[in-house]
Amino acid sequence: MARPRVILGLLCAATTANALLAPAVPPRRAAPLHVIETESSTDEKEIFSETTSISGALAELWQVLANPPPPGDFRAMYFPNCEDLKRPQTFQALFEHLEVCKDSSQRATANFGAHIHAMPGPANSIIVKNVPRSTNADVWDEWADEDEDDDFLSPEMRERLKALDAETAPPVDKCPIQHDLGDDDALKCSKDWVNAIVSDAGICPFSLSADRAGLPLGDVRYDVTRADDTETCFQWFWKEVQWLEDHPRHATSLLLMTNPYWASNFDAFEQFGDALTQALQSATESKVEGLGFEGQIQLVFFHPQYVFRDGGERAGADAAANYGRRSPIPMINILRTPQVKAAQKGLPTGLVYSQNEETLGDIGTEKLEEMLRTLDWSAVNDVKVDRSQVEVLKIARKMMAQGGGIKATDDLTLTGGAAAAAAETVAAAAETAEIVVADWASAVDEASGNTYYYNTKTGATSWVWPPE
């Protein structure tokens, strides 16, 4: 059984509520960070799943594909409780999706699509079979492997090639960013980046901090994988989608891919993302496309080399606006579609993009690049966006104030690390504090025009009186 994962918070999601920073509540004990581990698939030739969802079926299928049967053997997977897979169109769409997934890895070690195959079986089953490679293919692979070490080159030729590499190597500040961090450090630097760029700079108007965001405001679940093979990463992704389906109160998930392979291979990361995006598309009567997840989730991708390709000033690798998606660690943000639509309805995406271009342009590409390489975001401390003065952010703040999900530890006047620190302070004080009327005062929130109440000693706030 997988260990519990840490619950935190980030990026876009909010609708009606009556409690901004309401009653003091005990701080929640943080669960240990979950790191995906290789799980051995069963030795049984027939596997009967209890899952009722497509996401659950995909998670279990990719578990078998990541841990395939021995050469020449097979596994037959049955999903009797998954009603969606009983529909022919959905069953066909699943295999169309798997075909797209075959092209998502450029690694020589990729198994799925090479000698590991998935095919339709009787009674809507899926057959996973390990087909040994042909003798001719093995001979070619062995020849290629032998030449990888360049043993056939003379010492003189090796020296010439080494000198040529040195002459043509890009300067250090132009090399791809590739931070090889442990799981805890990767989580910390990712949260630091979110606090500084996404929240404090207002890149996501609905991100209060790395710990809280959305419309309605909610927690974000962070998860980490060290895997560099797509089979394991697909399994990891779909397990997370299934988890979100089972826990509707959590706003979103942020998945960190900490293996250096993904940071140094942007094309492979994009192909992986394209395969996931294809599953969001819906099938039509005349054409089988994706699996129709677009009604449930939306995906946002972050990478140290990310480049917008939708025109405008964001186009081109040198545009400052790209750094709104250039995170230190490759990440996949899973958002709930209803929350995204609620945010877009009240605040058009084009207005957000325009504001982001202006904000990041003022910081400048040189400073943004340096921070990304050094993992030091202190250079933007003096350019924190004042959300009470920027129209787009004022609108977003008002939407959050009127929306649901507000906790006693949320302060809509603070963002980033300040918001996180304030939340910890209020939560800690709440453990022993008693409500003393003399300690409370009232004020009017500038964004919404509503009256709220605040504790002059603990900093706790509430939309209602008395505080619950």
Image (cartoon, rainbow, N blue to C red):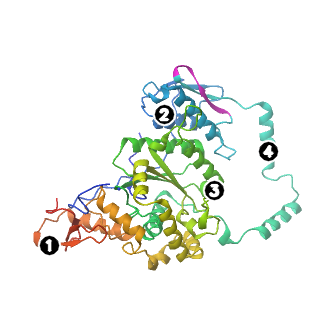
Q: Residue at x 36, y 55 (%)?
A: 219
Lower position in the chain sequence, tag 1 or tag 4: 4
Mark 3 secondary-structure assignment: helix
Mark 2 secondary-structure assignment: helix
Mark 1 secondary-structure assignment: helix
Which amino acid type is marked by label 1?
A: Asp
* Left or right of residue 110: residue 384: left
Give the labeled residue for mark 1: 439
Q: Residue at x 78, y 35 (%)?
A: 137
Q: Callout 2: few (<14), some (14-19), or many (20+) C-alpha neighbours within 10 Å?
A: many
Q: Callout 3: few (<14), some (14-19), or many (20+) C-alpha neighbours within 10 Å?
A: some
Lower position in the chain sequence, tag 2 or tag 3: 2
Q: Which mark lies nearer to you, 1 or 4? A: 1
Relative image position of residue 344 (x, y in whole percent): 43, 56
Lower position in the chain sequence, tag 3 or tag 4: 4
Q: Quadrant of the C terminus?
A: bottom left
